[in-house]
Amino acid sequence: MTPPLLIGNWKSNTSYTEAVSLVDASLEAVIAADGKVWVGVTPPFPWLMALRERLGQGHLWIGAQNCSATEMGAYTGEVTASMLKDCVTFVIVGHSERRAYYGETDDVVRAKVTRVLEQDLHAVLCVGEVLEQRQAGDAEHVVKTQLLAALEGYPEDKLYRLVVAYEPVWAIGTGVAATAEDAEDMCAFIRGVLNDRFGDSSDIIIQYGGSANEKNAAELLAKPNVGGLLIGGASLKPDAFAAMIQAAVSLSLI
């Protein structure tokens, strides 16, 4: 059984000085966890290489918040997975903010997953419904559609490079988290979809992401189908992030 995986998504935050301070604090918390929890952070693009060099290949993984659906070429402003290969371990793909604010379709998300795998990186694939879809009873349909579209043609020998993060969009940045039961139900549903798709999806970690914080981390991680957390605002607070890592450690000892 793999340890729980906690990923801090810094989004468009931090100066370089703040990023160094934050990554140092995160590393200290990870070392204290003594391998019982896997932890990654996704700083903004400009800080990635410097922070990777600062950390080396050790305890705390550095990831990217996004990548291009294209290869290298005449695509002004794009950052390709091949450019990221030397400075990150994983890439977040299809985050709800990318889908909502930048119009990323399921086809674009699938192309990004492909680019990430081509570079032997890990893909953290985000799926989730908006409030209107949940209220209409369409949450499972939406999540299944996003999931299967993104994983069309996915090579089964690279399942260990896939993480799925369930994001109830209505609980992101609002301070209103889905209940632990909501998270468990959808993560269990996702596991069923993955098992139907691949036969055995035990190599795939399923995270919950939606206003997870130091107050609800233990309750969420105690659920059998919640294999980790994708953390936004709380990951920018060293004490809160450390407390969430420690909550995961405590559960691993039970």
Image (cartoon, rainbow, N blue to C red):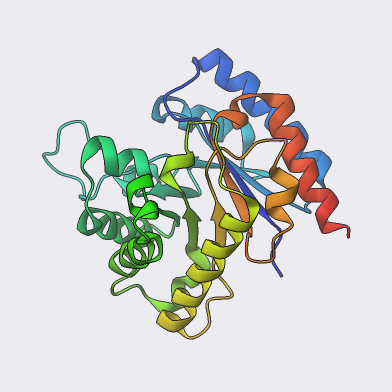
Q: Residue at x 21, y 50 (%)?
A: 71
Quarter holding the C terminus is bottom right
Q: Residue at x 47, y 21 (%)?
A: 13
Which one is nearer the viewer's eye here, 80 or 100?
100
Residue 98 at x, y percent in the picture: 31, 40
Vertically, is 246 above or below 174? below
Vertically, is 205 above or below 48? below
Residue 165 at x, y percent in the picture: 49, 54
Which one is nearer the viewer's eye here, 61 or 248?
248
Q: Which image quadrant for residue 222?
A: bottom right
Quarter holding the N terminus is bottom right
Residue 4 at x, y percent in the picture: 68, 56
Residue 67 at x, y percent in the picture: 32, 44
Vertically, is 227 above or below 81? below
Q: Is residue 99 visible?
A: yes
Q: Residue at x 33, y 70 (%)?
A: 148
